Image: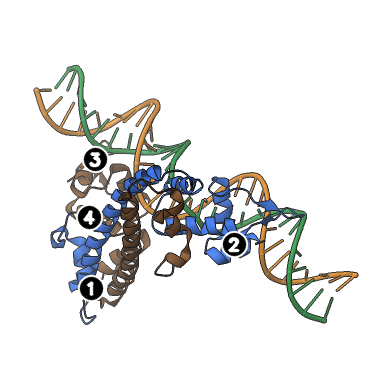
Chain colours: A blue, B brown, C green, D orange
Amino acid sequence: MFSIGDLSRRTGVKVPTIRYYEQMGLISAPERSEGNQRRYERRDLERLAFIRHGRDLGLSIEAIRDLLELSGHPEKPCGDADRIAAEHLADVKEKIAKLKRLEQELERIVSCDGKHTVGDCYVIRALADHGLCESEH
Amino acid sequence: MFSIGDLSRRTGVKVPTIRYYEQMGLISAPERSEGNQRRYERRDLERLAFIRHGRDLGLSIEAIRDLLELSGHPEKPCGDADRIAAEHLADVKEKIAKLKRLEQELERIVSCDGKHTVGDCYVIRALADHGLCESEH
DNA sequence: CCTATATCTCCAGAGACTATAGCTTTTGGA
DNA sequence: TCCAAAAGCTATAGTCTCTGGAGATATAGG
């Protein structure tokens, strides 16, 4: 049995966020102690870790809800999981593409040697001048 | 002189968002026409493009505010601008790494033959099990 | 000059939290 | 065993970064 604080420490999800997820129906209301405090079990911990992972990866609460729903029915064929996954895959690919473009720009920007001034700083110029970008955004 | 709509079209920032930035003090309140409509100049356009870039690159409003402040003092050394960009770069690299792992997992699922069930589905397992992750998150 | 489009202000909502206030419960040490 | 500190409770409000709608006014093109 974990308190909400234990759960928080073990998953890295803040206490109010855990309560928020409960309210949103992402995790079910756990048992309570005599004194009305939440008492979680191992599977709650796993579920929350799952959610945390998804969020870290930028999945929306809704996407995670879908995946959780699927994971709750391990006997079903995974066609639905496939569909949901396919939908998210497109998203993820797009995100990666954007981030890579960004990475390139930042790499170029960061390569400055610190010896010059803001006046000729590439960060500032790169942000100010669309013409310096290699890609569309 | 540009109207707010011109500015929006030229920078790709939506009209309400421009007004929001004004409210937040990221851009200063422009002159108004006889009829109280905002009238912008070239330098407003440049500043907004700068902001747009920063946001596209995932910088927080605060980071952008810092960079704008820096860009207003071109005589200063650019170490701070570099630092802001470098910090952000580390973030971006990490996100890319995570998303690539997710992409692989999703690819695997999508390419599945429909013959297995959610029970042995890798997306679900990957999200559920921290042990399958290559990195800390 | 008239109409369609653009703009204005103000306000509400979305999404995902985060914080505060004012309690009650648990826990660890003397 | 007792008690203070830490942790938890509910309820509500606020944050951040926009986004959208209503209803009124301004501007531009034919």
**A99, above or below A86, in the image:** below
Can you tell which quarter of the image residue B122 is in? bottom left
Can you tell which quarter of the image residue B9 is in? top left
Say whether residue A66 is left or right of residue C29. left
**C28, above or below B38, in the image:** below
For the residues labelled 2 and 1, the Cα–Cα distance comes to 46 Å
- Of residue A45 and residue B64, the one placed in the foreground of this image is A45
For the residues labelled 4 and 1, the Cα–Cα distance comes to 18 Å
Residue underneath mark 1: A118
User: What is the three-letter code of the residue carrying label 1?
Assistant: Val
User: What is the three-letter code of the residue carrying label 2?
Assistant: Leu
User: What is the three-letter code of the residue carrying label 3?
Assistant: Ser
Residue underneath mark 2: A7
- Of residue A93 and residue A75, the one placed in the foreground of this image is A75
In front: label 1 or label 3: 1
Say whether residue B61 is left or right of residue B73. right
In front: label 4 or label 3: 4
Residue underneath mark 4: B49
